[in-house]
Amino acid sequence: MDELKNEIKKTIISALQLEDIKPENIVDSEPLFGEGLGLDSIDALELGVALKKKFGIKFSAESSENKKHFASVNALADYISSEKNK
C-alpha cells in the first residue's frame, strides 16, 4: 500500500505541476483540498484524468462519492485498491 501511496503522490505532483513539492512533503492523511495541500476543483479534474491514465480507474462525474475518494492520499489509495480488486 505504501508503494501505491507513493505513486499517487508522484501522480499528483506531475499532473498538477507542483515542482516545489516532493512526495515526502505530502502527508497521507491530510486533506488534498482546502486546507492541507490546497487543491481546487480544476485540480480535481486534472488529477482525475491523470489517475485514470495511470491506474486505469474511473471516476463518475455524477458520483457524490468522489469527494470522499479525493479526501486524502489514504482515501485515494483505498479507492484505487478496491477498484483494482474488482
Image: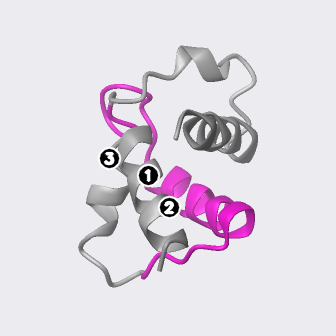
Q: x and y percent of residue 25 in the render?
A: 55, 15
Locate residue 74: give its quadrant.
Answer: top left
Q: Would residue 72 be counted in the magenta stretch?
A: no
Helix, strand or loop for disc 1: helix
Spatial CA distance of label 2 from label 3 is 13 Å
Circle 2 or circle 3, nearest the eye: 2
Spatial CA distance of label 1 from label 2 is 6 Å
Q: Is residue 11 above or below residue 47?
A: above
> 10 Å neighbourhood of mark 3: few (<14), some, or many (≥20)?
some
Q: Which residue is mark 1?
A: 76
Mark 2–mark 3 CB contact (< 8 Å): no
Helix, strand or loop for disc 2: helix
Mark 1–mark 2 CB contact (< 8 Å): yes
Q: Which residues are magenta?
A: 31-60
Give the mark nearer the N terminus: 1 vs 3: 3
> 10 Å neighbourhood of mark 2: few (<14), some, or many (≥20)?
many
Residue drawn at x 30%, y 80% as measured from the top left: 63
Q: Which residue is mark 3?
A: 71
Q: Is residue 1 above or below residue 25?
A: below
Helix, strand or loop for disc 3: loop
Circle 1 or circle 3, nearest the eye: 1
Label 1 amino acid? Leu
Label 3 amino acid? Ala
Residue drawn at x 56%, y 63% as measured from the top left: 48
Q: Which residue is mark 2?
A: 80
Locate residue 65: give its quadrant.
Answer: bottom left
Task: Please name whichever residue, 80 or 35, is drawn nearer the observer in this view of the structure.
Answer: 80
